[in-house]
Image (spheres, rainbow, N blue to C red):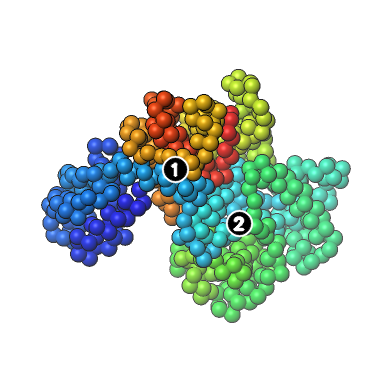
Amino acid sequence: MDMAKSKIAQWISGLLTDTPAQEIMAMLEYPKEESLGDLSLPCFKLSKKLRKSPMQIATELKEALEAKAEGDEFIDRIEAVSGYLNLFLKQSYLAGNVVLTILNAGERYGSRDIGAGKTIVIDFSSPNIAKPFHVGHLRSTVIGNALYRIHSFLGYQSIGVNHLGDWGTQFGKLIVAYRLWGDEARLEEGAIDELLGLYVKFHKEAEHDPGLEDEARACFLKMEQGDEEVLALWQRFVDISLAEFQKIYDLLGVEFDYFTGESFYNDKMEPVIQELKDKQLLEEDEGAWLVRLDQYNMAPALMLKKDGSTLYHTRDVTAALYRKQTYSFDKALYVTDYAQNLHFAQLFKVVGLMGYDWAEDEMIHVPFGRVTLEGMSLSTRKGNVVKLEEVLEQTIEKVKEIIEVKNPQLQNKDEVARQVGVGAVIFNDLSANRIKDIVFSWDDALSFEGETGPYAQYCYARTCSVLRKAAGDQLAGKAIVDALLLAEQFDPAKLQHPTEIAILKELALFPERTVQAAAKLEPSIVTRYLIDLAQAFNRFYHDCPILVEDERLRTARLALVKCVQITLKNGFNLIGLQAPEEM
Ligand code: ARG
């Protein structure tokens, strides 16, 4: 569709004054109603500029375009209706162009080079050491991973950074607590719960023993000064937590280029503080140092505490400068819960005030909504957290039960249950606009009929099963399911059924949807697309027999199935969803 769209945009632009093809491209819509054409240009915006009514513009464009498009390969007919210019594309163009493009491009279908030569740093997941990896971090992990993959597919160099919460006063608290109440044996077992228990106990005890807080601060200061004994203990906490987090990353299939957490900046903050001072941005306030942001209607950003220790902000300013210098990024994303909106607004402002003009354009906070688990709220402070690993494991268990009922014969049940269970969680996290709060419900996420991961994966498995059957079928012959052979023997005129046309149109949209998902930093555009495509395929599957006698029709339908298989898989890849061939 891309090609037709840009050609048509060029033609229309040529018929108007002062309206570049780019602008027309952005205005062209895909109507929901079939009767309104395949592409539609609303003429309302043009009306002011051209000083004509939208209907007059549409009518004039229709006539001029008909003359221009005479005998072309794209346009079948044009209508002007209530201020819209509706274009109907030729079936032969749609079928020929779309199917051959996909069969030839294969796993590259939808990829682009619009990001070539550009680097995007994506700060995501970033859980906190000595605390459980909770569903909020899962959301950051899943969204960040999708943005990483989408940008890579579009030619960007993506750099994934895990900005672990491995530094700060809370480690002072933890060390103090461990020395007072810690259990070596339990720590030896690698119990992250032991660490969380200590943290919770510390807060409880500190309520009536404020001296503890002072001790914790002193302890963290020692860490910042490089005290070996304290650092050795801290390192153990880090190792235990990392091993725990790694299990989850393995389950999800998520990788990072760098695990440079907050502690990584410990020896890099001093020059940054100095720079802030030199640029007269740092102001003393009761012994602490901060950057005032009243002018921008924001609370001040605290950079140094009274005792000289650093904060979350100090490390983020330092990390921003480090990343710009090290990776010379074109864009830097930060994927967190919207609770950190203010933090990032302050951060970008401070870096901007330091004179780095890229700060406010190139650094982008990508906030997302809260997750609740079937009505239960998830809080870390009180210790009643729902751990992600448990959610994942239970989901996998439930999928296993479903498989036992639906397909007890299935070969690699455990592996498939893992792919579908994890996929259900990933898909659920990416289904709605990211800013929306979501509720995780097993029934919804695992429904094979709803708009879910399992539904999309099941549709994929169905395409595989059709192609497998065809390969073993006398009529089709083994080789015919090969993409390139299908392309060779493909007759576009054979795909005339409305459900076939609907799939063709859906398939054609994939490249644009990917670009939109990147532009809006919104992976839900991909999940929405996958559901639309899967639904279109299921309608076709229901209405049209595939392994029919008519050889040309059979080949054409198999080619269409192959295209759906390729496109679904490419889409799954963008969001980190596995593609089981049988389920
Ligand atoms: N560790 C933080 C948290 O769990 C998220 C860090 C996000 N990244 C950053 N550069 N501040 O809330």
Mark 2 or 1, which is nearer the eye? 1
The image position of residue 98, as x and y in percent, is 39, 45
Q: Position of residue 38 (x, y in %)?
A: 29, 43
Residue carrying label 1: 488
- The response on whether ligand 1 sits within 8 Å of label 2 is no
Mark 1 surroundings within 10 Å by alpha-carbon count, few (fewer than 14), some (14 through 19), many (20 or more)? few
Q: Is residue 377 visible?
A: no
**Could you tell me residue 187's position as x and y percent?**
82, 45
Q: Residue at x 27, y 59 (%)?
A: 10
Q: Residue furthest top?
A: 405
Quarter of the figure that contains the C terminus: top right
Where is residue 90, by image quadrant? top left
Instruction: Name the kind of residue labelled 1 in the image.
Output: Glu
Q: CA distance from mark 2 to mark 1?
A: 41 Å
Q: Is residue 464 left or right of residue 222?
A: left
Where is mark 2, residue-wise? 160
Question: Camera-side residue: 289 or 37?
Answer: 37
Residue extending farthest bottom: 278
Q: Nearer the viewer, residue 247 or 581?
A: 581
Write the residue at 83% across / 49% down. Answer: 180
Name the amino acid, label 2: Gly
Q: Is residue 441 above or below residue 193?
A: above
Q: Which quarter of the figure has residue 395?
A: top right
Q: Locate residue 422 relative to residue 188 in the image: left or right.
A: left
The numbered disc on residue 328 is: none
Query: Residue 100 placed where, x, y %?
Result: 42, 45
Q: Is residue 370 above or below residue 402?
A: below
Q: Is residue 500 visible?
A: yes
